[in-house]
Amino acid sequence: MTAGREPAEALRALLPAGRVLTDPDAMDAYTRDQTYAVPGAPLAVVRARDTSDVAATMAWAQEERVPVVPRGAGTGLAGGATAVDGCVVLSLAAMTAIREISPRDHVAVVEPGVITADLDRAARAHGLMYAPDPSSHEISTIGGNLATNAGGLRCVKYGVTRHSTLGLEVVLAGGTVIRTGGRTVKGVTGYDLTGLFVGSEGTLGVITAATVRLFPAPARPPATVLATFPSLTAAGAAAAAIMGAGLRPSLLELVDRATLRAIDEWRRIDLDPGAAAVVIAQTDGPECPADALVRECEGAGAAFAAASCDEAEADALLEVRRLAYPAAERLGKCLVEDVCVPRSRLPEMVERIERASERHGVRILTVAHAGDGNLHPLFVFDRGLPGPPPPVLAAADEVFSAAIDLGGTLTGEHGVGVLKRPWLDAEMGPDVRDVHRRIKRALDPDGVLNPGKAI
Amino acid sequence: MTAGREPAEALRALLPAGRVLTDPDAMDAYTRDQTYAVPGAPLAVVRARDTSDVAATMAWAQEERVPVVPRGAGTGLAGGATAVDGCVVLSLAAMTAIREISPRDHVAVVEPGVITADLDRAARAHGLMYAPDPSSHEISTIGGNLATNAGGLRCVKYGVTRHSTLGLEVVLAGGTVIRTGGRTVKGVTGYDLTGLFVGSEGTLGVITAATVRLFPAPARPPATVLATFPSLTAAGAAAAAIMGAGLRPSLLELVDRATLRAIDEWRRIDLDPGAAAVVIAQTDGPECPADALVRECEGAGAAFAAASCDEAEADALLEVRRLAYPAAERLGKCLVEDVCVPRSRLPEMVERIERASERHGVRILTVAHAGDGNLHPLFVFDRGLPGPPPPVLAAADEVFSAAIDLGGTLTGEHGVGVLKRPWLDAEMGPDVRDVHRRIKRALDPDGVLNPGKAI
């Protein structure tokens, strides 16, 4: 750290007052995300307030060959924003302007530090909505959502963050500011740079503004359907039947038996003890009548299925899904995982998770964005441990392998960060990894941007 | 040509019999697309039948530093597939297998030579549909659609080709075969290589298979609404009102006065002579009732608006849109253009086109995918000319500048090819072009892939 003091002072001199932190205690809060990934010691933290702060930092970092780790709110679940030794942590959290909301073009122009749910609320004041809603949407930033191409509950109907992104302002390694895409819903001039930067986890450039698509907000609050199933296969079949019927629910979640038990132990939710899984669906439009959702669930073998349009009652039904994470955290520390499989393989994937749980003696609670085939197994371990013990890692390894084996992927929406890099070869193979490295070198030849992450 | 005979023989020796053409007359049909772009003389044409033909060709071309121009059906409208001197034209038109249609996962795996409408028909046999439907869908290939990220009429509801593409098999410069993406609807492992190759116009790799998303086919034939408007502004306001109300039409087209006149001169369609524009909309689902479309048109000032659910009558209404191209071609040769602006700027863009038409004395007919802000001005010129004369080029230049000026883009769905490269700097600026060149060099360091195109 002491060796680094001098360069940090040079950086401080380049930026307006108050932007650079070097006190280790003050910097500590900027070194981690929500994982157990062990951070390195940064040289400095830059709290950027505008694009020119970011450009100056990037130009300096390139010159000095200092690694830069961009971050938003630090809510990531893959270690993508954890500090590396001797880096500058570049916080975008203070760039919180919503520069524009256009009710005519259904777009917003936002800075990366805007909290995702705040953008949605601002859009609703104009009868619009910002669709992507990761579970963290009340605490995560648009910048972090863009960096990981975040999903969420509504993305079964409205698509993931990339689908809502029309254009970007990006600061490249070296400090050049570019603009990609635009504010049209179509456009094929040049390569899809917007799509390339989205999901690149801060390894190709630093996003300093985004032009995002807004959708008309649904006229009424959603109707909610809850159904219990005697088997996972039946629950998976219900999800497949709903999607297959072209119903377009705005939410379609599955909660497995282990999660239901954990919730029941805590809150006594009075669910059928024979229930192997619960499916929760919402609809926000006439193309997806609630009674059709009920019908598809019954047709797939639901023991119980009912809809509610009453907002308070619908909230109570959705509460089962919302309680999954806190119920898991009551039991210990959690490794929150994120595999995705083709929709039809969902029941099989849940079974493979159950098998891994038994084989390694690890409690695993699984919730899934069932309409997308995206599962979040929560691996519970002892609160006293600094990170997941060997049986948890072995069970996770088995789950990742199973996902790839079933034609799926290591991560549906959280990203690779540092934690999933060991499995990249298994999913991509060496040639595709090589293509990644070539693109990385093309845009960041000195490797200053978020080294050791994502690819 | 004679100088090239020897390398062509070496290529012939590498491939199965019947793959390589070198006879100039036989090769001629593989040198052009549907534009006036003047092709160079190829060394050879390879008619690939499988991925290994493509890989062998790419390996040889890299070794010999011979340019490769990939092509599908040659229906492009930007010169992206025109041969360059001394190149190998690599035709994917004979790779026509639909390798799989999965009704469970709603995906298809297809080779690039499959005709787009054929894939849609094959999907419909399973109650599904392939959504992207460029006007050329009965003659263009999936491979060409992927290369240009083609749009179409339904993309106002279902998105463009990139949105329907989950994964690719790509042969890189040098012949390495890679697989990107997968068959899950979500996935964030690594960079969005799938999105990068889609729309790259054959400059980064050759797509030899694609895993595409299918949607449940609508249960009933669409209902069609036709409305006439006394002003462009009112027609544009109707399109904006329909999209603003969240109605999600499956088609939303605008036909301008010049086009209506050309159709009427030819077919006497009995339209109100005071009509400045016609809006044609279709709906394929209950989230977009036809009477709501009529109401929005009336609210925006339509002189006439009516819906039909009768299939024959709906077809007759849609005929107005379908007649636009043949009506223009009746008048002479056409330069088919393709600008896209933010939705709200559509009426202004049509006015700018009308002004360019008057100023340069060029007849321009404009049809637009109004819901997307994507306009196709058709510049008519004398049939005796080999290509567009100076006044047409001057008018086109004015139209491109106007699109960029209104926050739009040079091309919404046709691509850049050779014909639009002169305007790239105006839209992108030098820094973004430089990023393109860096990515191109990273994936094709010797520049063998479709040189002089797209970027």
Image (tube, coloured by chain):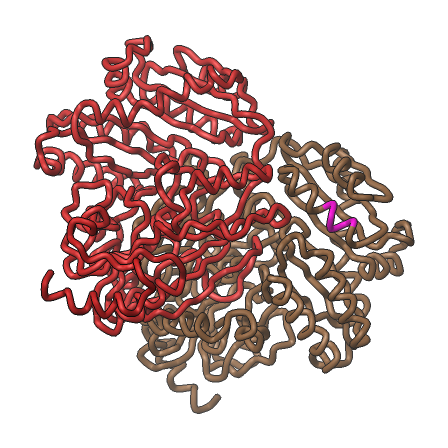
Chain colours: A red, B brown
Of residue B276 and residue B65, the one placed in the foreground of this image is: B276
Of residue B384 and residue B6, the one placed in the foreground of this image is: B384
Q: Is residue B187 magenta?
A: no
Which secondary structure type mostly characterizes the magenta part of the structure? Answer: helix
Q: Residue at x 71, y 64 (%)?
A: B377
Q: Quadrant of residue A281?
A: top left
Q: Quadrant of residue B307?
A: top right
Q: Is residue A146 above or below residue B61?
A: above
The spot of residue A171 in percent (x, y) is 38, 64
Q: Is residue A41 above or below residue B441?
A: above
Of residue A267 and residue A231, the one placed in the foreground of this image is: A267
Q: Residue at x 12, y 38 (%)?
A: A387
The spot of residue B93 in percent (x, y) is 50, 62
The spot of residue A433 in percent (x, y) is 25, 59
Q: Quadrant of the C terminus of chain A?
A: bottom left
How many marks do you count on the picture?
0
Q: Quadrant of residue B432?
A: bottom left
What stretch of residues is rendered in magenta? Answer: B234-238
Q: Residue at x 52, y 16 (%)?
A: A310
